Amino acid sequence: MAIERSRSRMMFRQEEMVELKQQCFTISRIFEPGKYLAGELPDEAYDMGLVEALPSVRGKSEEHPPKDDAPTEDAGASTEEG
């Protein structure tokens, strides 16, 4: 008999990103596997052990888009009149 890995909703902050490992069916919705905010998933997903914490991100955070330091096309362009 396999040991069931049960997780509680209380293990995650509501705004924390988690991963749903497989489909979760509820009366009102079907949740597809993927990344969700912990508060978006139903209790059933946690009770069945379908939710995993995402590994910590090293380096730049995924929450902040990269800064665009590249010069624009207009910068440094000479204007010709004539």
Image (spheres, grey):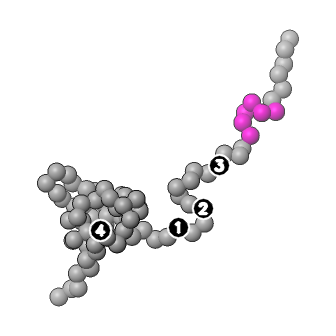
Tags 4 and 2 touching, CB below 8 Å: no
Whether the magenta-drawn stretch holds residue 72 is answered as yes
Residue pointed to by mark 2? 60
Callout 4 environment at 10 Å: few (<14), some (14 to 19), or many (20+)?
some
Q: Residues within 10 Å of mark 3 (few under 14, many from 20)?
A: few
The residue wearing badge 3 is 67
- Residue 22 located within the stretch drawn in magenta: no
Q: Quadrant of residue 10?
A: bottom left
Pointer 3 with pointer 4, Cβ within 8 A: no
Residue 4 image point, x, y percent: 22, 81
Q: Residues within 10 Å of mark 1 (few under 14, many from 20)?
A: few
* Residue at the spot 74% in from the left edge and 40% down from the top edge: 71
Rendered location of residue 55, percent (x, y): 46, 71
Give the Cα separation between the discs numbered 2 and 3: 11 Å
Q: Is residue 26 left or right of residue 36?
A: left
Return the residue nearer the eye: 16 or 21.
Answer: 16
- In primary-sequence order, the first of circles 3 and 4 is 4
Q: Nearer the viewer, mark 4 or mark 2?
A: 4
Type of the residue with mark 1: Val
Gap between marks 1 and 4, in whole Å?
21 Å
Please report whichever mark, 4 or 2, sits nearer to the chain's N-terminal start: 4
Instruction: Determine whether label 1 and label 2 are within 8 Å by CB.
Output: yes
Callout 3 amino acid: Lys
Residue on which disc 1 sits: 57
What are the residue bounds of the magenta stretch?
A: 71-76
- Element under label 2? loop
